[in-house]
Amino acid sequence: MPETGSTLPRRQLGRYLIEWRTRAGLSQQKAAELLEIGSSSLQRLERGLNGRVHVRDIQAACDLYGIPDDLAGFLVLLARQSSAKTWWYQVTDRAPIHFNGYVKLEASALELKTFQPQLIPGLLQTEDYVCALFASYPDETVSEHEGWIQLKRQRQNNVTRKLRPLTLSAVVGEAALRRVAGSTQVMAAQLRHLADMSTRPNVSIRVLPFSAGFPRGAGNGSFVILEFGTTATGMPTEPTVVYLEGIIGNMYLEEPTDVAEYHKLHAAIEHAALDAVASRNLIRQIAREHSA
């Protein structure tokens, strides 16, 4: 069972420290020696189990491992928020896209449940759909658009890889199927891709039709539930995390009572949604309407 000292910011910080220590070619023991801290302290830091994270230790590790300044600033932010059980992540605090905290978290998950009332889920978006979405952000450069597309491909590989692919259970609102991003041709291709992905054994896609109304307050917006598997004794390897994306910032919840509420909400939405076959049929029908 995860130890009580663990919080999401601490675990995220630990993942980055392991990754960059490995890139630097340092063993845990050698890194601890150079950082002038105990090897057991570094081990706990990398596992996200330190009762208190010292910013000076993180800054020293960033210097030792050659971590870029922009990412180093993000890791210091994680260190300062290390005790938070509810992690509020402001857009202005966000690391560069290749260091996005959510991406690291998603890559570690074994199962993902999501409700997306207005947009096609990111893990299921086509490149043209992504481009159409980013076209509405005039301040973004071409290189930034390309970076987001590359990152999206990286994330989608978690679903399509052959070895232990991510299990994805998505409920998509009918509005996401009918709202046009880019052009009707883009939408037709996107929906055909969505229907094709729904045939994969690790992917479940259900449509919440307009006629279903708002089960358990489903009009509140999108959310993602990330689960990380269990140990040999059946205990979770990490606490489940709920991710809520906002305009000015993102929120991560891991308090058991909060997580339980979102599990209930997802179950209620899934119960009100069409079954897998009816969902696939509706997706293909709307794709034909976009093509007409």
Image: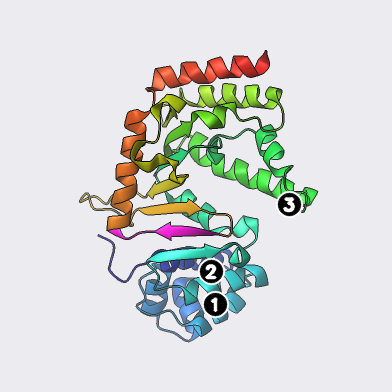
What's the distance in space between the residues labelled 3 and 1, CA to CA? 28 Å
Q: Tell me, for residue 21, which label it has, or none.
A: 2
Report the front residue among 167 and 162: 167
Q: Which residue: 43% across, 33% down?
A: 171
Q: Residue 144 carries which label?
A: 3
Residue 239 located left or right of residue 45: left
Give above or below for 222 relative to 169.
below
Residue 258 in the image, given as x and y percentages of width and height: 32, 56
Asked whether residue 68 appears in the rendered view, the answer is no
Residue plotted at (40% across, 40% down): 218
Instruction: Please indicate, yes or no, whether residue 205 appears anywhere in the rendered image.
Output: yes
The single residue placed furthest to the left in the displayed view is 233
Observer-nearest residue: 244 or 179? 179
Q: In which quadrant of the rendered view does residue 256 lie?
A: bottom left
Image location of residue 209, percent across then percent down: 45, 26
Q: Hey, what amino acid is under mark 1? A: Ala
Mainly helix, strand or loop, the magenta region?
A: strand
CB of mark 2 within 8 Å of CB of mark 1?
yes
The label number, if any, that marks residue 61 in the structure image: 1
Q: In which quadrant of the rendered view does residue 10 lie?
A: bottom left
Q: How packed is label 2: few (under 14 Cα within 10 Å), some, or many (20 or more)?
A: many
Q: Earlier in the sequence, mark 3 or mark 2?
A: 2
- State the extent of the magenta-drawn residues as a range: 249-256
Q: Which of marks 3 and 1 is nearer the N terminus?
A: 1
Q: Check residue 251 for magenta coloring.
A: yes
Residue 184 covered by magenta stretch: no
The spot of residue 272 in percent (x, y) is: 35, 29
Q: Do the residues labelled 3 and 1 touch (CB within 8 Å)?
A: no
Name the residue nearer the viewer: 29 or 240.
Answer: 240
